[in-house]
Image (cartoon, rainbow, N blue to C red):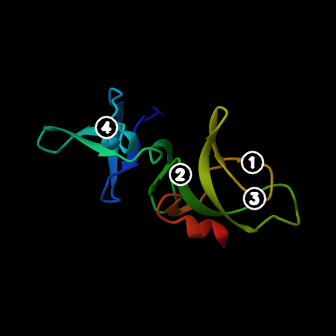
Amino acid sequence: MERIIKFRGLTANNEWVYGDLLHDKPNSTAYYKEYSQRICWINDKGASCNQPVKNGTVGQFTNVLDKNDVEIYNGDIVKTVYLGNECNARGAIIISPIEYFGSGFTLAITYTPIYPFIVDHTIEVIGDIYRNPELLSK
């Protein structure tokens, strides 16, 4: 399977845009301090498009789809069932953000060690850390 490299970022209107990631040339404007990156893509009419995105909101595609065929990105919050070997935790519902750690994406579970990002039929994107941080306090 070929790895797809693409990114997403939040616009000033809090909407996701998807495509290639570009970094603007550094400058001293207030706008640059908040929007120093752009997501670029070719639209369905063949025109090149780009959109400034908020610093700190860029996430890379993990190359994994959830159980509803939704793309999973770094910074997404997912819900899944623990399928590990600890019998007292097996079957527990896990809500966790996806983070890049070391050489791959992981579930960043706060009360246990970080587990590898395991693709299974139960994983589902339920939000993201930028617009839905309250999901992590449940």
Amino acid type, callout 1: Ile
Mark-to-mark CA distance, 1 and 3: 14 Å
Q: Secondary structure at mark 2?
A: loop
Q: Earlier in the sequence, mark 1 or mark 3?
A: 3
Q: Earlier in the sequence, mark 2 or mark 4?
A: 4
* Label 1: few (<14), some (14–19) or many (≥20) C-alpha neighbours in 10 Å: few
Q: Return the x and y of residue 2 as percentages of the image width and height.
A: 45, 32
Q: Are marks 1 and 3 in contact (CB under 8 Å)?
A: no
Q: Nearer the viewer, mark 1 or mark 4?
A: 4
Amino acid type, callout 3: Leu
Up the image or down, 39 lies above or below 133; here it is above
Mark-to-mark CA distance, 2 and 4: 27 Å
* Label 3: few (<14), some (14–19) or many (≥20) C-alpha neighbours in 10 Å: some
Residue plotted at (74% across, 61% down): 82
Does any portion of residue 109 appear in the rendered image?
yes
Q: Return the x and y of residue 44 as percentages of the image width and height.
A: 16, 45
